[in-house]
Amino acid sequence: MNTLEQMTEFGHELVSFHQDPETGLRAIAAVHDSTLGPGFGGCRRWYYATESDALHDVLRLSEGMTYKNAIAGLPVGGGKSVILTQEPGAKATEAEARAMGRFIERLGGSYISAEDVGVTTRFVDWMATETKYVCGGVEVSAGGDPSPHTAQGVVNAMKAALAYTGRPSSFENVHVAIQGAGNVGRNIARIVTGLGARVTIADINADAVERVVEESGATAVGPDEILSVECDILSPCALGGVINARTIGELRCPILCPGANNLLEDYDADGRRLKEAGIVYVPDFVANAGGVIELAGFYVGLDESVRKQKITAIESTALELLRMSESEPNTYFAAVALAKKRIREAKEAAKAEATTSA
């Protein structure tokens, strides 16, 4: 399937490829839907085995951002970008980041970038020397690291799932297993242990795991064990696609509440499998919206109090969706239906306003 066919299938408005001979930068940016505003979503820096893998990832991620931003009530659409590194673990450079900034600038504000996997606040600041269409830096750009806000949103979604299953949302005597000891996973561990939870953690980065163990008193297990740990809540916070036909049978948790994007390999089939298995699943683009609420909200000028309120509201939104999902094939369908409803209402309002003005 060629790029245009994939764009049509996913419903994208724009996909742009870029290469910079001087730095070796190879990147793709995608805008899925701009009904609510310019496409907003992070830049992921990753090694992809093939260009096709990178394209598929940016299409899925940007589509997810459309739904995430719509459900969060943000005045932005869905966008995403990926940088294709030459090899796994390739060191980021200022020259590469600045080249990426120039690429984003050429898109003229149709896409606004921020952090994602493999991109730091420093990288964002480097990009920001070349473009104003970026958020999440510290010195040149602003907004800072969104991961504490992402983590808080995931914890709020966990509270909704606990309430939905008839359990207190205090986290006392609750066992949370976290896949991924990066910034989001580490912050989730910090928050839930502070509320009385017990945490099990895993990551391919042993130093990151040790840090979470020291800070939160977590128990470490191997990366190949974490999905099958018996726990109350499983929170995958690494890369997407880890919940699929093979791994669902290994899960020993009543609640699945992710920090990672694109958690399900197949939204439809895997969502149905989770429901059939009796596992309560909070869709990733609902649970992990705290980071984009903070950064996109900051970028468009929402007050800090409004941003905090929207992150707090993840709990009530997640609970509403879990209840809605009882009459849907799965919670993913319920979440997408809610997002599309908000986008449709925005289109109708814009059409009515244009008619009135005419």
Image: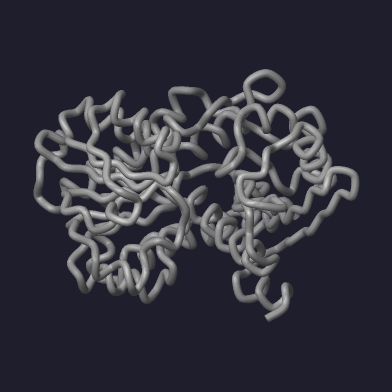
Quadrant of residue 348 within the rendered picture: bottom right
Residue at 67% from the left image edge and 44% from the top image edge: 90
Residue at 50% from the left image edge and 56% from the top image edge: 67
Q: Can you name the residue that lies furthest to the bottom here?
A: 1
Residue at 11% from the left image edge and 34% from the top image edge: 172
How far from the left and from the top, in percent, is residue 263?
Answer: 41, 59
Q: Is residue 40 above or below residue 120?
A: below
How far from the left and from the top, in percent, is residue 279?
Answer: 21, 62
Q: Can you name the residue that lies furthest to the top here?
A: 139
Q: Is residue 287 visible?
A: no
Nearest the eye: 345 or 177: 177
The colour scheme is: one colour
How far from the left and from the top, in percent, is residue 284?
Answer: 40, 53
Query: What is the quadrant of the N terminus in the image?
Result: bottom right
Query: What is the quadrant of the C terminus in the image?
Result: bottom right
Nearest the eye: 105 or 189: 189
